[in-house]
Every structure is written in C-alpha cells, then in structure tokens.
Amino acid sequence: MQLTLEFGGGLELLCDSVKIHNVDVDLPAETQKLTMKHLLPWVRSNLIKERPEMFIKGDTVRPGVLVLVNDCDWELSGQLDTTLEDKDVVVFISTLHGG
Amino acid sequence: MESNGGVDESSLLLRELQSLKTSKRDIEARISVIEAQLQQIQSNQKPSSDCSNGSSDFGHELTPDMIYRYSRQLLLPSFGVQGQSNLLKSSILVIGAGGLGSPALLYLAACGVGRLGMVDHDVVELNNLHRQIIHGEAYIGRSKVESAAAACRSINSTVEVVEHREALRTSNALEIVSKYDIVVDATDNAPSRYLINDCCVLLGKPLVSGAALGLEGQLAVYNYNGGPCYRCLFPTPPPTSACQRCSDSGVLGVVPGVIGCLQALEAIKLASLVGESLSGRMLLFDALSARIRIVKIRGRSSQCEACGENATLTRQQFQQFDYENFTHSPLSAAPLMLKLLTPDSRISSKEYNNVIKNGSPHVLVDVRPSHHYKIVSLPKSLNIPLASLESRLPELSSELKSVQESNETPNDSDVGIYVVCRRGNDSQRAVQLLHRMGFTSAKDIVGGLESWAHDVDHRTCIIITNQKMKMNIGITKSSIIPPSETIADSHLTDLLISFDPNVMKKALADLLVSFYLMAGRLDRAESGRIVINCNGEGVLFVEAELDSSLDDLGEFTPSPKLHRLTPTVDCSGNISSYPLCFAR
C-alpha cells in the first residue's frame, strides 16, 4: 500500500533529517487491512534511525507526539485502530515549546 | 579595545553620539505621548465644527482621532466599527516578551486593544535581537517588559499598557490573568504552557498558544467556545529530551515572528468577535519547505484533568501544583547540568589546558553536531558528533594510532582521550559510550567549551546563552579580599544620586583595556566612608580585558536601583549573585 509519511517538529531528526517519505507498506497477511497499530512498528523498524524512544513508548507514540491521518487528529479516527487506505498521508509531529 | 594607548577620539565621539541618539529617541517618544494626550484633551473640549459633534451621533464610541488612526481597518466590511469598538473595550495579556511576544505585542498595540498587559522576568540580551524585534540595542541589559512597553507606547499612546515585570508562577498567575479577557501564550518552555493552560481553564479565558523552534512553528486556540484545552491534546508531558529550546537548537528569527503575528491575529479576532477562530484546529508552519498546514484536532476531552467532566482542578490545587516537577523541566530555561561520570573520568578546562601546555600526547574529540563545530572549535580537535560516535570509532582509533606514532609512545594506552561538547552534558554521554567500547581512559571536559571560554581562553568566541553577559571578558588576575569589618545596613540612594553618569563613563573609558571588576555593592558606612557591601564574603577583585565597547555595558543612569547601573554579569561563582560595580 502506498503511503506518504511525514515527520515534523524535530521528529525528522530521528530519520536522517528527511521529512517526507513515500513508502510502500505490505498489508499484514492475516487481516489484509492496514491499521495504525501495524504501521507504528513498521515505521520504528524501517524509518527510525536513532533514539526510537523519542518516537515510540509502549505500543503507541510517546507523549507530545501528534499523529495526523489525512490532516486529522488520529483521536478522531480511532487512534491505533485507524484503518489506512492507499495514498493516505500520515503526519507525526512533535509538539514545540520554544518561543 | 585591544590597544593600550590612550583614548581613541573617534570612539569617544561615537559613544557620545550613541548616547545623544538614545536621549533623542526618548524625548521624541515623550513628545508623541504628550501630543496625543493634548489632542485627546482638545478633541474632548471643543466640538469639531465640520464633521461631527462628538462621536455619539454615529452610534459608536470612536473619537475622530480613533476613526482616523484605525480608518484602514474600519473600512473592512467584516471588521468595521463594531469590530474596532469591541477591540477597544477588550484586554489582552501576552505572556513572554520574546520571539513570539515581540510581534504579537507590536500588532496588538498598533491595532487598538483597550488594555495590553505583558509578563516577563527576563532582560534583553544581544543574542535576542535577531528575533525579538520589539527590543533594540539601547535596551540590552534592561527588562524586556520595560523595553516592550516603551515600544508599544511609542506606537500607540492611547492603549493602556500594563507591565508585569515578573515570572508567571502559580502564586501570581490567577491574580494577573483574571484582569484580562484573552491570554496569549508566548512563552518558551513546557511547564509554563501547562501552567498557563490550567490557569485559563480555571478562569474561563481563551488561550492563543504559539510555539516556534528551528524552522517550524505551531499555533492553536485553546479553551474557547467548547473547544479543547492544551491538556486535552497533551495530557502527559513529553520527556525532557523532547523539549528543545531555541538556545540549544537554534531558531531562524522570522519563524517565531510569523507565529507571533498569527497569535496577534487570532487574539484580535477573539477580541473583536469577528471571523472563525483556530479553536479545535492547529496550524503547523514549516518555513523551510514553505508549507502551512491546518489540521483538525480532537475536541474537548471528557477525561481531561483540567477541563473534563470529572476534572477536580481547583484554584487551591493550582496554586500548589508543581509544574516543574510535572514536566521535569524548569520554568525558566536554565541549562541542564548532568552528572553521569565519576570525578576521575572528568577534567576541568584548566587541567586540560595543562595537558596541552605539557605536550602530553592525546586526542581531543568534539562531539557537538558538525554545524556547531563549524562556528567555533578548539585547535586539533576531531569532530565526531555524538549521534555517530559509535559507528565512527575507527576514526578515533586511527587518530590515536597516528598520535602514538608521532610521539613515539610505546603503546596507545599512553595517549589520552578527552571529549568536549558545548556545556559538558553530551561529552559525558560520549565518555560513557567510549568506556563501554573499551576506551577506558576517556575523560570529558567539565563544562565544555563554555567553561573553556570562561576559565582558559577568553578569546574563544562562544555563543553564550543563559548568561547575561554578551562580551568576552578575559580575566587575567583575580583575588578575594576578606571583609575587614561588618557594617550596618544603609541606603545607597545618596551615594548614587551624587554620581554623574558622564563622569563614570569617561572614567571607564580612560581605563579602557584593563580595569577592575569587583563583585559587590558600593555602600556607605555610618562614618560616611565609602565601603563595599559584600555580604560578609569578601570582595572579588578581578583584572580583566574586554573585547567590546563600553556601550555594551548599558546606560549609566543614576538610580537607587544598582542593577540598572550595571551590566548583569554572571561570573558563575557565589559572589557573583550580587550586582556588580566598576571601580578603579
């Protein structure tokens, strides 16, 4: 499945400072349906190059990371249960505190 | 200021010019205030003959001056007289007069908010000016709020500007925030953001929250019209390692400028009751790729500890809540000082200086990111950023080998490994890693390059942050003189009033290269003798060289408040907690 994954707010530093990744993710064999629950470990092992604890905590993202699926907070689409479609855009953004 | 020979005439003239320009600006600001007040009085006294007999005829409270001043925004159909009238009746509090607060305050003052409050405890520093555009060079060393208030008044003397020269804390937040209709969060740290959010929830104030770092910015309106609060979105604070600061990660000046302008815009919309606010949405700004994205965020959370259905947050709890402990980071952005290593794995910058002087064979590894290394570095250092240290260990091994061969030492364990970074935190992490990888002799330099610049080489230019001093001071000699007698407390006023700033300035100019800094307060004993009040600790006499002009020391205006006479220098010793004065 073709997805566009974007990292911002400093999270791009964990993936060689590349912000936008056009990726092809295989569907899980058992369900044939890709959810965020499947995508997070995929990102962790395929894109995150350093300090994975700055991205993942437990089975979800660490506190302070907003996840947006097609420009919409993933809380509104079911968080980890959000089902992804082909060509979806998933943004991971770390909240900023500077000023 | 390197030359020792006499006073350069042109530099004296330049200094006088600078001082005259500052006075001129102050006088002009005062003239504009008086003119505005006069116009106000005149327009109230005599009814204008041609166009109106007072504003009430038009069914609004705008005076002819206001109509003229705000005419360009009154012409907007979607804003108009009603929007302006609402704005004039509103009060807005901007917390933080820094990169975000600067443009926000300027626009809010210009557009005609009724009452504009500002909170900040900090002073203006030279390294603020690239982004904190409300402040100018003349205000370096002075309160940010004082500087910002003067700028706002000079733009619009009809706005009531309220100065809060203090940090926002749980003890004062409720009282300050309750006086305003709308709050703009323009702070720079995580605990302040939670503190301000909770305070706004308790008092029912809408919150315009902005943040910027590096080349990115974020903006949202919280606690407005049934929308979420900051805690709904971020119930758990992020780890401290994810809370980067502008002083560490850098920020392009215009980025907080853009976000600060947008904060002013959102606050103006809320105050004038026009348009659709950014509540329930978040604006994400990426300057480098020129992208602005507006995303939909979750609504108010029923589980939220601040604003949820079962939220139990009370004013009393708020006042007792420890936000620094909650977010594990300080309210004021003080640099972190880790202690990961035992003392025998660390050396001071002075000790490292001896290593160089003695010609002991060693390798110095600088573990800062390469873009930091390019700004300034120590000679013969090897740059391997911490993130890539593990994979680039062969480079260290080959460097050790070549040092060993050129010094003809029998084995490479005789070659020392020293690790340096900016402040001495990453260097400790690096040494831990090196120890694990078998480089057991590795040591780090305590305090990093900042300590090197402070204690050893004063010509090393360090981008100093969180230190109030902007110039390099080369300390050549220092000694502590213990107090000879204790004296009763007395007042400084008479001493300082008799002090002529021009004489002081000239005297300092005469000293030029080497002069004495002493940490302590000038005081007068009951006998009338001038003494130095050093709190019983003695006086630190320091002979030092400066690399910048005396104008950087701030204006020498006579004042009973000593800190306004002097630059705020942090000498990082106990005694330096006192204001510093200059004497021969």
Image (tube, rainbow, N blue to C red):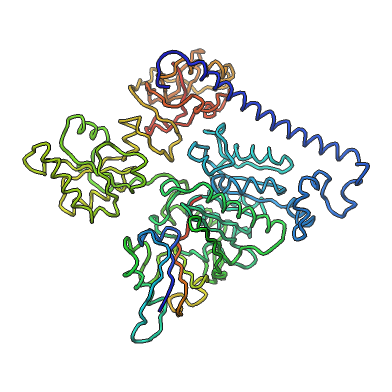
Percent x, y of residue B20: 62, 23
Residue drawn at the location 52% of the way across and 60% of the way down: B291
Q: Is residue B519 above or below residue A19?
A: above
The image quarter in which residue B135 lies: top right
> Looking at the image, is B51 positioned above or below residue B530?
below
Quadrant showing the C terminus of chain B: top left
On screen, residue B157 versus residue B12, left or right, reads right
| Left or right: A95 as drawn, with respect to B408 | right
Using the image as rendered, state which of residue B319 and residue B105 is in the foreground: B105
Confirm whether residue B490 shows in the render: yes
Residue in the picture at 88% in, 53% down: B58
One can see residue B343 in this view: no
Seen as rendered, the residue at the extreme left is B410
Above or below — where is A22 with respect to B39? below
Q: Nearer the viewer, residue B198 or A27?
A: A27
From the top left corner, tell me how far across and down residue A79 is, in percent. 46, 75
Q: Nearer the viewer, residue B164 or B449?
A: B449
Q: Give how far across and how far down residue B224 sits, in percent.
A: 63, 63
Indicate the quadrant containing the N terminus of chain B: top left, top right, bottom left or bottom right. top left
The image shows a total of numbered marks equal to 0
**Residue at image point 73% right, 35% down:** B33
Residue A18 place in picture, x, y as percent: 39, 61
